Image (cartoon, rainbow, N blue to C red):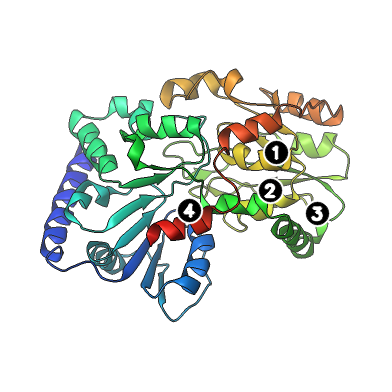
């Protein structure tokens, strides 16, 4: 209740702030606000080549953005002064590009700029936004605040028919809010040269991966869990059972800090918040995940995916899924580490359905998403 009251007061403050600044006409300024750096880091360099506008990037991810340009201002700090500056830039921008939910959206109808939501996932196994089961535990005021916030979004990038239907339900949007092309970061998977460059970079930067069969474990984020000291995947058992030619990459959600001193082995690399998901997937031979959207990206490589929903019943109840889990996923489903290792050792994979899975969720992604977004901005 106290948190909700604080958020309501914050939205009132932002409304007041936007009202003061809305007297100013939108400037030739594009503002990016990102919790996940992948879309912005692809779009901004190309945008800088074509635009005469000032571009301001508020990077709230844990990975720094090192690109520099005379017309680009990047903020990597997350302090009070930066936040006020962000609100001022949003209030006076012609376009605002976001990739997540932000509380300031509750007051966004008072600004004149166009808000484009790129989102941070190609597809969705888990429910989110207004469909998220956890909202049932929130107050009616909280639900109304979320609903108003999502309706203040002007456009959403949409990679497929199925995801478009999910966006409409989750954000409460109409068809004319959907831009039928995918996320800029998805362009990577259509560019074989970039994929090969990424793989070469990974083997050069992490020589222990060279010649190895690489297994990547990339679970989804569990609500309100920011520190992890124990994984549900038994890494020690995998190392003891699998041949030395297998290496494991850990790629946890960007919001999570992981520290388990027991996992100290040259065959295990924790690259969470170190490498982009594109770099990690380029070197991956087998993906282990659960409800994470990383599966939709990895499907572009037509390689084995093991789904490991160890908490399926609890997750269905607390968060909710967009359909029956066994119908949503493709590939093998395991419920413990022993089953996972058994699949790997026996090479017991059927990848015949991955192509149709990829096409269903990447329907509108043709390798030119970044350019289409830039054209929409203009």
- The numbered mark, 4 or 2, whose residue comes first in the sequence reads 4
Left or right of 30 in this view: 211: right
Q: What residue is drawn where x is 32% and y is 60%?
A: 95
Query: How many circles with numbers are drawn on the protein?
Result: 4
In front: label 3 or label 4: 4
Judging by the rendered image, the residue that carries numbered circle 1 is: 287
Q: How far apart are the two marked residues, 3 and 4, measured between alpha carbons?
A: 26 Å
In front: label 1 or label 3: 1
Mark 2 secondary-structure assignment = helix
Please tell me whether residue 117 is drawn above or below residue 370 in the rendered image.
Answer: above
Q: How far apart are the two marked residues, 4 and 1, measured between alpha carbons?
A: 21 Å
Tags 1 and 2 in contact by the CB under 8 Å rule? yes
Q: How far apart are the two marked residues, 4 and 2, measured between alpha carbons?
A: 16 Å
Quadrant of the snapshot with the N terminus: top left
Residue 49: x, y in percent?
50, 73
Residue 75: x, y in percent?
39, 69
Mark 3 secondary-structure assignment = helix
Residue 281, which numbered label? 2
Judging by the rendered image, the residue that carries numbered circle 4 is: 36
Q: Is residue 137 visible?
A: yes
Q: Dot 1: few (<14), some (14–19), or many (≥20) neighbours within 10 Å? A: many
- The numbered mark, 1 or 2, whose residue comes first in the sequence reads 2
Q: What residue is drawn where x is 81% and y is 61%?
A: 207
Residue 212: x, y in percent?
85, 49
Mark 4 secondary-structure assignment = loop
Q: How far apart are the two marked residues, 1 and 3, measured between alpha carbons?
A: 15 Å
Mark 1 secondary-structure assignment = strand
Residue 209, which numbered label? 3
- The numbered mark, 1 or 3, whose residue comes first in the sequence reads 3
């Amino acid at each position: 209740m106290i948190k909700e009251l604080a958020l309501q007061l914050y939205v009132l403050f932002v409304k007041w702030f936007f009202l003061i600044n809305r007297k100013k006409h939108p400037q030739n300024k594009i503002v990016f606000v990102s919790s996940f750096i992948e879309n912005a880091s692809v779009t901004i360099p190309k945008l800088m080549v074509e635009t005469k506008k000032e571009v301001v990037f508020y990077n709230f991810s844990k990975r720094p953005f090192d690109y520099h340009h005379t017309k680009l201002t990047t903020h990597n700090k997350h302090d009070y002064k930066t936040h006020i500056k962000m609100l001022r830039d949003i209030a006076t921008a012609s376009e605002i590009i976001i990739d997540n939910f932000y509380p300031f959206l509750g007051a966004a109808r008072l600004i004149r700029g166009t808000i484009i939501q790129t989102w941070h996932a190609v597809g969705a196994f888990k429910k989110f936004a207004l469909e998220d089961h956890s909202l049932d535990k929130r107050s009616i005021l909280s639900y109304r605040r979320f609903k108003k916030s999502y309706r203040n979004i002007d456009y959403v990038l949409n990679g497929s028919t199925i995801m478009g239907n999910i966006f409409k339900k989750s954000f409460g949007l109409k068809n004319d809010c959907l831009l039928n092309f995918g996320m800029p970061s998805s362009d990577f998977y259509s560019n074989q040269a970039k994929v090969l460059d990424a793989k070469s970079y990974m083997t050069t930067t992490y020589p222990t991966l060279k010649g190895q069969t690489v297994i990547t474990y990339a679970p989804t984020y569990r609500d309100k869990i920011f520190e992890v000291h124990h994984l549900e995947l038994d890494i020690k058992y995998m190392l003891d059972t699998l041949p030395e030619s297998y290496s494991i990459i850990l790629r946890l959600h960007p919001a999570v800090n992981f520290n388990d001193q027991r996992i100290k082995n040259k065959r295990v690399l924790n690259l969470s918040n170190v490498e982009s998901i594109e770099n990690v997937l380029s070197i991956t031979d087998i993906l282990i995940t659960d409800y994470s959207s990383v599966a939709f990206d990895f499907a572009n490589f037509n390689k084995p995916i093991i789904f490991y929903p160890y908490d399926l019943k609890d997750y269905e109840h607390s968060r909710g899924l967009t359909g029956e889990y066994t119908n949503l996923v493709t590939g093998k489903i395991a419920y413990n580490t022993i089953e996972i290792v058994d699949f790997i050792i026996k090479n017991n994979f059927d990848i015949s359905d991955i192509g149709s899975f990829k096409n269903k969720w990447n329907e509108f992604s043709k390798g030119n998403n970044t350019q289409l977004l830039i054209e929409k901005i203009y």
